Amino acid sequence: MGGKGPFVKAIDQQLQRGDIDAAIHCLKDVPGDQPMSQGLIFAGMLPRAGLERLGLTHRIVAEFTVHEMLPAVGAGVLALECRRDDAPVAALLERLNHPKTQTEATAERVMLHGLRGHCNSPIAGYCTTEPDGQLSLRGMVFSRDGSKFAHAHIWDETSNDPATLGSRVCAELLRQDARDIIEGIPH
């Protein structure tokens, strides 16, 4: 049915028309290869790990580390969206915002956007905040059959700016022929 992009777009159109005042998206389902719909913003992001949020940790059988399986960009993040000019709703959603999650998700999404990744692109990314406050972003692209991949892990030691970190990881992946890997172009 055209992937997740058309579903997100349909909700965005309802927001733009004023049919609804706010929307909640799983951030991993929001395409990264195009800008936000006109006039809309993510006013807040909730803390990451769906089963923990739902109080279902007893259902966890095994946990994978990021060394074993790097998650999709934005995995576990709920993004709260509204119209940019709707100050009362934006202020309400901002009160729910988790700044650490928003910062980490921003780094991941900047990387995804630079790679022109969409919902079905074989791109993974995960940003963490170290105990000393330093950001760390891992990014990976891989071929559909898993035979080729590019991987980067960078700590932002200077500006600690999520957009800068996302751009740096993207640049490193592109240096490793990430676009060709994503598109399935053989070498």
Image (cartoon, grey):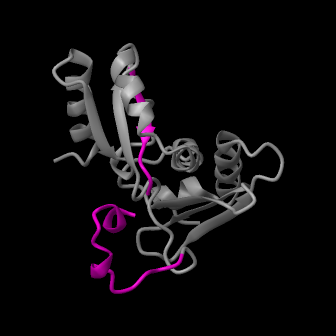
Residue 117's place in the image compared with 56, above or below, is above
What is the residue that sits farthest to the top in this orientation? 85
Left or right side of 157 for 125: left
* Image quadrant in which you'd find residue 114: top right
- Residue 41: say if magenta: yes
Residue 21's place in the image compared with 68, above or below, is above
Region in magenta: 40-65
Instruction: Please state the horizontal and vertical placement of residue 26, each as a whole percent of the image.
Output: 33, 49
Residue 99's place in the image compared with 72, above or below, is above
Query: Residue shown at 16%/20% (left/top)?
Result: 19
Query: Residue shown at 42%/74% (left/top)?
Result: 145
Is residue 20 at all visible to an observer of this figure? Answer: yes
The quarter in which the C terminus is drawn is bottom right
Instruction: Please state the horizontal and vertical placement of residue 115, each as a whole percent of the image.
Output: 55, 47
Residue 115's place in the image compared with 86, above or below, is below
Query: Residue shown at 50%/61% (left/top)?
Result: 124
